[in-house]
Image (cartoon, rainbow, N blue to C red):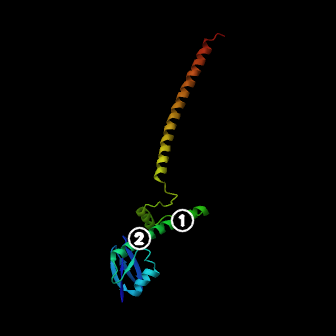
Amino acid sequence: MSTVLYNPTGELVSVFHDGLEYKLNPGDKIKISDSAANHIIHTQHYDNRGLVKLEYGDNEKVKGTEGLRKFKEFKKKQITIYNQTNTDNKIKGVPYIQPTEEVRKYAMDLGIELLEPYNLKDDEKAAISKSTEENAKLKAELKEMREQMAEMMKMMKADQTEKSAKVPK
C-alpha cells in the first residue's frame, strides 16, 4: 500500500526515511509507502509543519487548509519559544540568543515582534537621532555663548582700564 503526502505550505519540506530524502516543494504531492508516510508525519512531527496525508476520497482543499492552519500554529510556536527563551535568559542574566533566519521570516510573515535586545526599534532610533540633533544644536549655542562671554569680558576689562586711567590719583 502507499500513501500520498501533500505539502500545502509555502515552504520546501525536506524529509528523510530509511536513508532516502524526500523533497516536497510548495504544493507538491508524492506517493510513498504507508510506513514511510507514518514515520514522517508522526515520528518526525511533520504534521505540525503542515504536511498532510491524502487518502482516497479526501478533499484536497480541506486537508490543505488544515495543513496551512497547523503550519501557522507551528510558526507562532517557534516565535513564542524564541521570545520565551530570551525572556528567561534576561531574567537569569544569561546572554540572549539570536533568531535564526527561519524564525525571523516567520515573525515577518505573521507580524509578531521578536524580543531582540540588541536591535533598536524604529521609535528608539528616531529618539536617538532627535537627541543627537538637539545635542549638536546645544553645543553650537554653548560655543556661541562662550565666545560672547569672552568678548564681554574683554570689553569689561577694557572699560575698567579706561576708568582706572581717567580716575585721578
Separation (CA) of disc 1 from disc 2: 22 Å
Q: Is residue 92 above or below residue 162?
A: below
Counting from the top left corner in percent of width and height, residue 49 is at 42, 74
Q: Quadrant of the C terminus?
A: top right
* Residue, disc 2: 69
Q: Secondary structure at mark 2?
A: helix
Residue sitting at 44 percent across and 68 percent down?
Answer: 75
Can residue 95 be seen here?
no
Name the residue that disc number 1 marks.
Answer: 84
In which quarter of the view is residue 74 placed?
Answer: bottom left
Q: Label 1 is placed on what type of residue?
A: Gln
Q: Amino acid at mark 2?
A: Arg
> Which quadrant is home to the N terminus?
bottom left
- In the image, 93 versus 6, the foreground residue is 6
Residue drawn at x 58%, y 64% is 88
Query: Can residue 112 be seen?
Result: yes
Quadrant in which residue 105 is drawn? bottom left
Question: Which residue sits at x=42%, y=62%?
Answer: 108
**Quick one: label 1 or label 2, which is nearer the N terminus?**
2
Question: Is residue 118 positioned above or below 131 on the image?
Answer: below
> Which element is circle 1 on?
helix
> How far from the left and from the top, in percent, is residue 107?
44, 63
Can you give x and y, in whole percent of width and height, for residue 59 in the image? Answer: 33, 78
Q: Residues within 10 Å of mark 2 (few under 14, many from 20)?
A: some
Where is residue 80 shown, x and y percent of the image? Answer: 50, 66
Q: Nearer the viewer, residue 101 or 81?
A: 81
